[in-house]
Image (tube, helix red, strand yellow):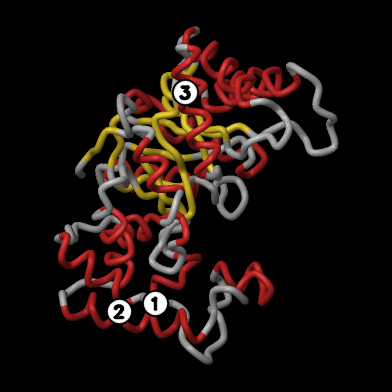
């Protein structure tokens, strides 16, 4: 599988990464291991987890499943900000980051985190506090690269300025929700990341399954689907006539070119110059094959697909 470097000086990632958010919540250790092994066999070297996934079980299951093959992959994990009910005082976020990193290292059974994300920014703590704590972890060798997630363009710009002024480790990438049905990030966040020398790692590339073809206009959601689990309130913004019109247009374009709409959804993101790797989750080994596209869209094809959703 093709690999790309994340931003300026980040780790080299397989263009499709395995999202491990289902480990420890929807699937157990054995099923998680089967998915991990299928991903390794497919050439995936980018494994994305977080301390919050499965209340830590995702990291445990991933570390155990990788076993002796740990050095062949890039492990990305994420720390949470301080609890919302904990008042901010100087240093509390830095302590949270240090404690979270140590706990993730233990659960993963490793001596370093290849790519460490700030899962969500802290609304009150200064940018300097998080970046200084992360820089300490990098200098200690416990973290190799750092990145952001779920941030605004302004936060991306501010972090780049602070890191540059202080000489601290800088964010090499940012993880954002981005798909053919969720394109608001293209207005300011993606350009800000590119200007800051950061690679982009999209998550939810299949729009909770809308871009897999499993949902049909006017039909009940499949019982084992994400939208069925989370209910109508969650699905309201996705299951619209406008989105079904787009999905049907994407399906037609994909079929004309001998591909599935899933392959189109991932291939289109990988055709964006800012994108390094696309995160796709899986609960079964067979999902790996469906998410591992070999469709390389030309700039003209990518532009045509973008226009179908206008």
Please give the name of the residue rendered at 40% of the width and 48% of the height, measured from the top-left corner: 190
Q: CA distance from mark 3 to mark 2?
A: 39 Å
Q: Which numbered tag is attached to residue 72?
A: none
Which residue is drawn at the image coordinates 53% and 14% (left, top)?
Answer: 137
Within 10 Å of the Cα at label 2, are there few (<14), some (14-19), or many (20+) other Cα atoms? many
From the viewer's perspective, is 109 left or right of 114? right
Precedes in sequence: disc 3 or disc 2 = 3
Q: Which residue is mark 1?
A: 213
Say which of marks 3 and 2 sits in front.
Answer: 2
Residue 24 in the image, given as x and y percentages of width and height: 60, 45
In the image, what residue occupies the spot 77% across and 35% down?
A: 83
Disc 1 from disc 3: Cα separation: 36 Å
Residue 282 appears in the rendering: no
Residue at position x 62%, y 36% from top? Answer: 121
Which quadrant: the C terminus? Answer: bottom left
Helix, strand or loop status at disc 3: strand
Specify the quadrant of the image occupied by residue 192. top left
Where, quadrant-wise, is the N terminus in this rendering?
top left
Picture coordinates of residue 280 (x, y %)?
A: 41, 53
Residue of label 3 = 113
Are discs 1 and 3 less than 8 Å apart at CB? no
Name the residue beneath numbered marker 2: 251
Q: Earlier in the sequence, mark 2 or mark 1?
A: 1
Q: Are marks 3 and 2 in contact (CB under 8 Å)?
A: no
Q: Residues within 10 Å of mark 3 (few under 14, many from 20)?
A: many
Q: Name the spot of residue 93 as percent of width and height, x first.
A: 70, 24
Q: Residues within 10 Å of mark 1 (few under 14, many from 20)?
A: some
> Element under label 1?
loop
């Amino acid at each position: 599988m093709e690999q790309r470097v994340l931003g300026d000086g980040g780790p080299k990632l397989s263009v499709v990464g395995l999202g491990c958010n289902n480990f420890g919540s929807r699937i157990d250790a054995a099923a998680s291991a089967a998915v991990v092994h299928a991903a390794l066999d497919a050439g995936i070297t980018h494994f994305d987890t977080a301390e919050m996934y499965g209340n830590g079980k995702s990291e445990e299951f991933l570390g155990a499943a990788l076993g002796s093959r740990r050095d062949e992959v890039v492990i990305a994990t994420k720390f949470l900000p301080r609890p919302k009910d904990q008042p901010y005082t100087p240093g509390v976020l830095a302590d949270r980051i240090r404690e979270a990193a140590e706990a993730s290292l233990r659960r993963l059974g490793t001596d370093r985190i290849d790519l460490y994300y700030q899962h969500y920014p802290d609304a009150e703590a200064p940018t300097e506090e998080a970046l200084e704590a992360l820089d300490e972890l990098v200098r200690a060798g416990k973290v190799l690269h750092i990145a952001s997630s779920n941030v605004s363009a302004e936060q991306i710009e501010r972090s780049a300025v602070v890191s540059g002024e202080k000489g601290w480790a800088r964010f090499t990438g940012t993880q954002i929700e981005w798909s053919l049905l969720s394109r608001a990030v293209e207005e300011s966040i993606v350009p800000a990341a590119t200007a800051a020398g950061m690679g982009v790692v999209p998550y939810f590339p299949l729009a909770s399954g809308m871009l897999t073809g499993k949902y049909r206009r006017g039909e009940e959601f499949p019982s084992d689907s994400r939208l069925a689990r989370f209910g109508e309130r969650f699905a309201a913004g996705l299951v619209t006539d406008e989105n079904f019109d787009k999905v049907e247009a994407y399906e037609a374009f994909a079929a004309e070119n001998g591909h599935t709409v899933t392959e189109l959804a991932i291939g289109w993101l990988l055709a964006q110059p800012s994108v390094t790797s696309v995160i796709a989750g899986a609960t079964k080994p067979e999902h790996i094959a469906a998410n591992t596209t070999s469709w390389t869209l030309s700039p003209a094809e990518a532009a045509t697909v973008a226009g179908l959703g206008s």
